[in-house]
Amino acid sequence: MGIIQRLTSRNANPVNKILNPSIEQLVREIVAVNHAWKEARSIFEDSSSPIAVSLRNLKTRLQVRLLRQYAPQYIYLREDTTDKSEEPLYGLCLVHEIDNCMDAAHLPTRVAQEHLSTEEIEHFLEKQ
């Protein structure tokens, strides 16, 4: 049985699926919410519209949950120096591909510091 199969087999119970989603489920949700957030910003031409703010906050909560449940064994933080963003970012990098994805979107460093302790961030950072 593979790593991902072992992780998902514990989620056979419907209550467990909600309380302890698989890494695949969390990644799918993060990707979907990230796309919806970007679309909302585009449609409303305002990143402070209530729907855009709500989607951004949901994405952050899902990312924090993913890190706390699966890092650093299956996902880790990497400082992203390639993205042309207005602020420093972390990439949430997957150890194994899920649905053709190798990451679970970006998390601004500032937001990570608001939601995670310094110890958690250090623990989740890529080990060089």
Image (cartoon, rainbow, N blue to C red):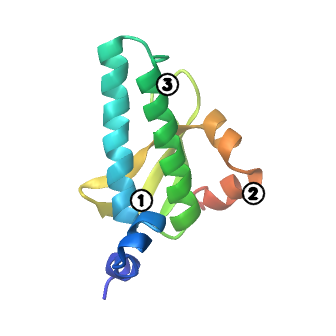
Q: Tell me the quadrant of the picture where the N terminus can be found.
A: bottom left
From the viewer's perspective, is the residue at label 3 or at label 2 nearer?
2
Q: Which quadrant is home to the C terminus?
A: bottom right
Left or right: residue 110 versus residue 29 is right
Residue 85's label in the rendered image is 3
Q: Residue furthest front?
A: 15
Q: Quadrant of residue 102?
A: bottom left
Q: Residue at x 32, y 80 (%)?
A: 5
Residue at the spot 50% in from the left edge and 49% down from the top edge:
63
Mark 2 and mark 1 residues within 8 Å of each other at the beta carbon? no
Vertical order, 10 against 54 (above or below) = below
Residue at position x 35%, y 27% from top?
A: 38
Relative height, residue 82 to residue 86 (above, below): below
Q: Nearer the viewer, residue 73 or 32?
A: 32
Residue occupying the point 40% across, 64% down: 23
The residue carrying mark 2 is 119
Residue 62 visible in the displayed image = yes
Q: CA distance from mark 3 to mark 2?
A: 25 Å
Numbered circle sitting on residue 94: 1
Whole-percent x, y for residue 96 in the image = 36, 66
Other residues around mark 3 within 10 Å, as few (<14) / some (14–19) / many (≥20): few
Q: Nearer the viewer, residue 35 or 88?
A: 35
